[in-house]
Image (cartoon, rainbow, N blue to C red):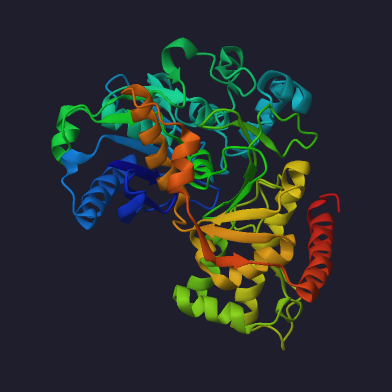
Amino acid sequence: MYVGVDCGTQSTKVVVVDIDQAAILGEASRPHHLIEGDNGKREQDVSEWIAALTEAFHEAVGEARIDAREIRAIGVSGQQHGMVALDADGQPLHPAKLWCDTETALHNEALIERLGGRVGCLDKLGLVLQTGYTASKVAWLRDTHPDAYQRIATLLLPHDYLNFWLTGERVAECGDASGTGYFDTRTRSWRHDVFQAMAPELSPEAVLPRLIDSHAPVGTVRSDVARLLGLGDDVLVSSGGGDNMMAAIGTGNIAPGMVTLSLGTSGTVYAHSDVPMEAEDAQVANFCASHGGWLPLICTMNVTSATTKVRELFGFDLTTFGERVASAPLGAEGIMALPFFNGERVPALPHATASFEGMTSLNTTADNLCRAVVEGTTFGLRYGFERLGELASQASQVRLVGGGAKSSVWRQIVADVLDVDVICPRLTEAAALGGAIQAAWCDTQTRGRGESLAALTERLVEVDLDTLTRPRGEPVRRYQELYQRYRQALAERYDVAP
């Protein structure tokens, strides 16, 4: 038995997997609260992650109807880029600053300039710093909370922090570390010189966690945590990784030829590469994978976060929202959404705001606004899809994950906008499943069974044929026209090249 944990922006999910039966026996989740500010602040109290993990773990184990002492290993997935700054006693010095925080945009711009612009960033890191990466958060803490900054003993990412809580070990792995902004994604190593450029008073050797391989264990669960969760002795904790890296494993995207697209709080599009990607487009993040190789990726910041804003504005539940989207015509009778409620990362518009264009006294209905926000977020994902070039264009099928993937209407919109077949894994919470699979891989490697990751994903990642959705001729043509209108709106409003 193995457990996968995914600590996302909105909740923590836990799944219990029996790899011998190739079955998911139990799953549960608990929500988190978001601390928001008009200046782009997006933070969370890390104690909520611990409480959510604990409660979801007990529910998932109960649903699985197993004794928790049967569990052999745990794998943790976490939202990328977050900053968890700890003091010498392992206590947080500030609420975790999240991936979607844009309060640090000016700090990010200053860091890019300090590193020599786009060319300097690519030379030092293999990618260009983006607002939301951990680096600008460290610089922000230095300027705004110098007392807390001076007391930093360790800097961790969200999944690293949960691993620390489970084991007491302060380590990181290359996939999630890729999104810090002080890690060389080509050589898989910290860039101490880059770190010191943004945090000259801190010693990178002291505050940056030890790097381990993706298949390696962080350690074993601490005895007090084991008692809290009802675990036996010597339960391994695998390296874990960022949510996108774990979702790649959870969708079987561990070899060239597949694309995963996530309709989560944010939107991501990524594909496996055996070599580092020398991207002509700086918006493509040349991240490492958490299974070996690389995972070139783009991220948009407004997907279900944007649709939830509109849904809650009208007081609709998810079912009603889906019905309203389905009842509106393609193109929402001329309304187009630029759904940048949280700014935007791809394209790089950290200060952008949301807008709905083309509204008249006749077409401004709840149905059309619901449809427009779904179409607008999907156009943003197509923009990112195109940035991946051949890695995306050569894919014959896209694996769709995240909460939005549960909507048949949205799946059809994605298929028509991208003009490609889409299909969902049977478990759409792919990051949690990826954590469980990686935990099994770590356990079999560490304890001598030696089962390969490819064999594990082949047995455990199952697609849901009922979700296979193919693009349709006329809607594809019409969405092509509407997408060009979307690109023109970006050009006119934000000077993004059409």
Residue 480 appears in which quarter of the rendering?
bottom right
Question: Is 361 above or below relative to 165?
Answer: below
Residue 31 in percent (x, y) is at 34, 55
Quadrant occupied by the C terminus: bottom right
Q: Residue at x 60, y 68 (%)?
A: 410
19 or 189: nearer the viewer: 19
Residue 353 is left or right of residue 266, and the answer is right
Q: Residue at x 55, y 29 (%)?
A: 180
150 or 272: nearer the viewer: 272
Q: Residue at x 33, y 55 (%)?
A: 29
Residue 71 is left or right of residue 362, and the answer is left
Quadrant occupied by the N terminus: top left
271 or 227: nearer the viewer: 271
Q: Residue at x 73, y 43 (%)?
A: 388
Residue 433 in percent (x, y) is at 41, 47
Residue 175 in percent (x, y) is at 53, 30
